[in-house]
Image (cartoon, rainbow, N blue to C red):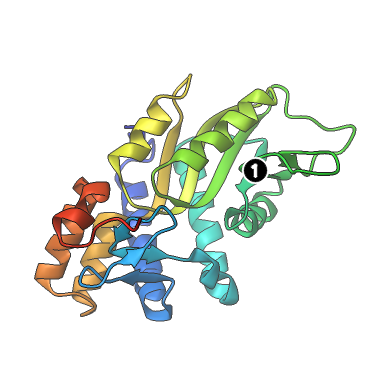
Amino acid sequence: MHQSTPRGGRREEIIIDSLGRKIAEFGLEIGAIKLNPDNPFQWASGYRMPIYNDNRMFLFHPEMRRTIARGLADIIEDRGIDPEVVAGTATAGIPHGALLADLLSLPYIYIRDKPKGHGLKNRIEGLDADSDLEGRSVVVIEDLISTGGSSARAVEAVREADGSCDWCLSIFGYGLEKAAEQFENLDPPCSFASLLTFPVLLERAEAGGFLSSDQIALLADWRVDPFGWGEKNGFPKAK
């Protein structure tokens, strides 16, 4: 797994834990993060999952927007990432990537999951006729790393455009093994990190009285086997 070995060591762990707690507490308060293992949400895939996350809700709150941008910048500094371009992922990663690019005074692009079906049929947006990614270091910004498929495809899109991409950063990550495999299977592998991790979310959810200890245990089980969890707990996949 490449959520790994911070160059800044303990300082970075403290930064991420502190920011993660703040994001978790605020996200739970405003409903950007919803947890319900007793009546799980149906995802687009049809699976019933005990968590639903909508980081777009943070955009309404200026201080939280700034907190997230500064946190991503801190990871970049502490892990020795030296990007020449910031790339947001469509759609929810676009605004947070743009805020980070402004903070770092770097060029900005965004990446569609698939090429646009009309016009120039671009997958990467923001490059003009005199700009390209050839030989440039790009950091990809996601709002959420779930199973990692769309994130890995964004990294591949940068590399196919002759850019270099060794890092994908996000606001929140579920910490699923599937995501680690997606990044590891890229050639070369890509590192990734999130401001809010799943263990920190569970810690704050329990401390804030959002969940009981039994519900926390159900969520911990979900992360181990997210696609088998619903069936195991009486919530089969929708047909």
Q: How many marks?
A: 1
99 over 61 or under it: above or below: above
**191 relative to 56 in the view: left or right:** left
| Foreground pick, 12 / 146 | 146
The amino acid beneath tag 1 is: Val
Residue 169: image location, x then y, percent: 48, 45
Looking at the image, can residue 3 be seen? no
| Foreground pick, 139 / 222 | 222
Q: Residue at x 46, y 24 (%)?
A: 186
Residue 147: image location, x then y, percent: 39, 44
Residue sticking out furthest to the top = 187
Residue 173: image location, x then y, percent: 38, 51
Residue sticking out furthest to the right = 129
Q: Quadrant of the N terminus?
A: top left
Q: Residue at x 42, y 64 (%)?
A: 53
**123 relative to 171 in the view: left or right:** right
Residue labelled with disc 1: 86
Residue sticking out furthest to the left = 214
83 over 185 or under it: above or below: below
Query: Within the image, what quadrant is residue 181 found in?
Result: top left
| Foreground pick, 22 / 10 | 22
Query: Within the image, what quadrant is residue 32 found in?
Result: bottom left
Instruction: Bin the neighbour count of mark 1 within 10 Å (Cα to Cα): few under 14, some 14-19, many 20 and up.
Output: many
**214 relative to 193 in the view: left or right:** left
